[in-house]
Amino acid sequence: MTNKWNIISVLLIILLYSSCNTYTTYYSKTYTSTPNRNKSKVHRLDFSNKNVESLAEYIVKNKNLKMLNLSNTKISNLDNIFIQLGKHTQIEILILDSLDISRLPKSIKTLSHLKQLSLSYNPKLNLEDTFSKISDLPIEFLNLKGNNIAKLPDNTTSLHHIKDLNLSYNILSEKHNYTLLGELPNLYSLWIDHNNLDQLPETIGALDQVRFLYIDHNNLNVLPNSISAMKKTWVIHAGYNQFTELPSAFTKMKSLFMVHINNNNIKSISEAYEKEKYPLAGLILDNNPLLDSEKEKGKKLFKGFFLLSFEQNQ
């Protein structure tokens, strides 16, 4: 038992770190304009919603820049900015949200230290072209939120370095998408929340490398049996769906220790939780219309859990 709780403690620490804002890798001050003094001390620069015409010149003078946010700006020469970043900095975090981009300039290939790239809310973005240009970069976090993506290109499999992939607010119901994602060897966290999914395809089982799965804010009421093939998954977020029963599929997942399934329509707990052995040790069932008898059953079934919650908002 001690070993079990030691493992759970370690996993909780990992969970807390994984839940942090990805862009806070560098904890120095974030500047929203180019400072008059100590320009070389700036590591984080947020130029979102600003005029960036003089930015290339500033980059030449600041060789320590690590994070740059250019979201929602009007950029006439993104290519030149990338060239200067590649020449004069070791930029690691680049945020290019809401720029109406259709194709990235080839010069993005010069950003050889880039680890985090956000391209959210660029629905015209050509994914096949984008993936071709960034596949050799050491990008570990890629944000493609809100790009109206229905189909991933076949060269998605070239993104070998990706650990965290945000595909929230898209429409990824096609089963082949998950076959492609299953071929990303280092994929650790996957967000497919807010994708208007009525069901998960059987190919979800191809994601046997994923540790954290976010399927919340969809229209799911059942889970496919193939989800049991996700043998490395630790945590699932499945809140704000249409489940009426705590899915029995969770008992078949060999590494699953935590489930968030709040704000559904769950009234009962599957009998599988009385019959099966499973590693699940944390369960959040807040804001579900569970019958009192089912709550009592749950408290007995899950009495050894490190976290168990049936809270209801008044």
Image (cartoon, helix red, strand yellow):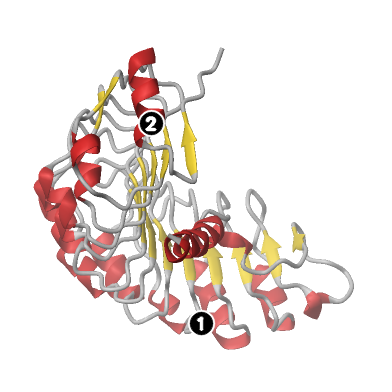
The answer to whether residue 279 is above or below residue 7 is above
Name the image quarter holding the C terminus: top right
Residue 267 is tagged as none
Q: Residue at x 23, y 45 (%)?
A: 251
The residue singled out by tag 1 in the image is 113
Nearest to viewer (mark 2 / mark 1): 2
Residue at x 74%, y 82% (from the top left corner): 61
Residue 247 picture quarter: top left
The answer to the question of whether label 2 and label 1 lie on touching residues, with beta carbons closer than 8 A, is no
Image-based side of 163 in relation to 62, left or right? left
Foreground pick, 75 / 38: 38
Residue 303 appears at what percent x and percent y? 43, 37
Q: 264 above or below 88?
A: above
Image spot of residue 83 (x, y percent) = 52, 80
The answer to whether residue 149 is left or right of residue 57 is left
| Distance between the alpha carbons at the discs numbered 2 and 1 | 51 Å
Residue type indicated by callout 2? Lys
Q: Quadrant of residue 130?
A: bottom left
Percent x, y of residue 213: 34, 51
**Could you say which is closer to the camera, residue 67 or residue 289?**
289
Give residue 101's position: percent from left, percent from top: 40, 55
Q: Is residue 240 visible to the viewer in this orientation of the structure?
A: no
Which callout, 2 or 1, points at the residue further toward the start of the chain?
A: 1
Q: Residue furthest bottom?
A: 87
Q: Tell me which amino acid carries mark 1.
A: His
Q: Residues within 10 Å of mark 1 (few under 14, many from 20)?
A: some
Q: Is residue 37 left or right of residue 26?
A: right
The secondary element bearing badge 2 is classed as: helix
Q: Quadrant of the N terminus?
A: bottom left
Residue 232 at least partly seen: yes
Residue with the mark numbered 2:
300
